[in-house]
Image: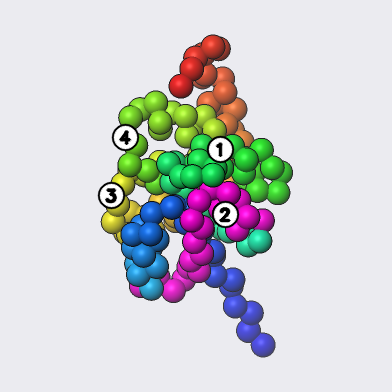
C-alpha cells in the first residue's frame, strides 16, 4: 500500500472576482496544490478554521475584515499562528509593506503578478519553519521604534 503526500491547500482571500478567476484558471496548471477561495477577510477567517491551509494569500483592501486585521487574527491564534501568510496587494507604499511585516506576513507581493511569481512565493514560505518565523517576529519587534505610527 502506498501513502500519498497530502496536497497543500492554498487559500486566496480577495474580494475581486477577477483575481479569484485568475487564480482558479492559473492553478489548473498546478495540480500539486489545492486552491480554495474566500471573498473577504471574515470569510477567509472562516475558511482557515475549516481547512487550515498550507499557505494563505491575502489582499489588504477588503470589506468586513481587512487584510491587516486578518493577518493579526491569524498570528494571534495559536492554532493558526504558523500558517505562512503572503500579502498580495495593489498598495505599493513602504508603510504598507512595513505594516504587513510588523503584523507577521511572511512575504509581500504587489499586484499585478504572474502566476510563476506566486508559485515561487508559495514555495519560499513553505520552507519557513516556526522557529524562523518566531525569530523574524522578535527581530521586527526589536527594530520597531516605540510610538511609531502607520
Magenta-colored span:
29-49
Residue where numbered disc 4 is placed? 92
Please tell me the numbered disc located at residue 112. 3
Camera-side residue of 95 and 2: 95
- Pointers 2 and 1 in contact (CB under 8 A)? no
Find residue 80 and report its horizontal and vertical position in percent: 65, 48
State left or right for residue 105 relative to residue 113.
right
- Ranked by sequence position, the earlier of labels 3 and 1 is 1
Q: Residue furthest right?
A: 78
Seen at 34% across and 63% down, the residue is 22
How many angstroms separate mark 2 from mark 1 (CA)?
13 Å
Closer to viewer: mark 3 or mark 2: 2
- Pointers 3 and 1 in contact (CB under 8 A)? no
Query: Is residue 19 visible in this depiction of the protein?
Result: yes
- Pointers 1 and 4 in contact (CB under 8 A)? no
Residue 95 in the image: above or below residue 79: above
Q: Residue furthest bottom?
A: 1
In the rendered image, residue 31 lying in the magenta stretch gets the answer: yes
Residue 3 in the image: above or below residue 100: below
- Pointers 3 and 4 in contact (CB under 8 A)? no
Closer to viewer: mark 3 or mark 1: 1
Tell me the quarter of the picture where residue 23 sits. Answer: bottom left
Mark 2 Cα-neighbour bin, 10 Å: few <14, some 14–19, many ≥20: some
- Ranked by sequence position, the earlier of labels 2 and 1 is 2
Residue where numbered disc 1 is placed? 69
Find residue 139 and report its horizontal and vertical position in percent: 55, 26
Find residue 106 and report its horizontal and vertical position in percent: 49, 41
Amino acid at each position: 500500500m502506498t501513502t500519498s503526500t497530502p496536497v497543500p491547500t492554498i487559500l486566496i482571500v480577495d474580494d475581486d472576482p477577477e483575481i479569484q478567476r485568475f487564480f482558479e484558471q492559473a492553478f489548473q496548471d498546478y495540480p500539486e496544490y489545492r486552491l480554495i477561495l474566500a471573498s473577504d477577510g471574515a470569510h477567509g477567517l472562516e475558511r482557515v478554521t475549516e481547512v487550515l491551509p498550507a499557505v494563505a494569500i491575502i489582499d489588504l483592501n477588503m470589506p468586513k475584515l481587512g487584510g491587516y486585521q486578518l493577518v493579526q487574527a491569524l498570528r494571534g491564534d495559536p492554532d493558526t499562528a504558523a500558517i505562512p501568510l503572503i500579502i498580495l496587494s495593489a498598495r505599493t507604499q513602504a508603510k504598507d509593506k512595513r505594516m504587513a511585516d510588523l503584523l507577521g506576513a511572511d512575504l509581500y507581493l504587489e499586484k499585478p503578478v504572474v502566476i510563476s511569481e506566486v508559485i515561487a512565493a508559495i514555495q519560499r514560505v513553505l520552507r519557513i519553519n516556526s522557529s524562523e518565523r518566531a525569530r523574524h517576529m522578535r527581530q521586527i519587534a526589536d527594530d520597531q521604534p516605540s510610538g511609531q505610527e502607520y
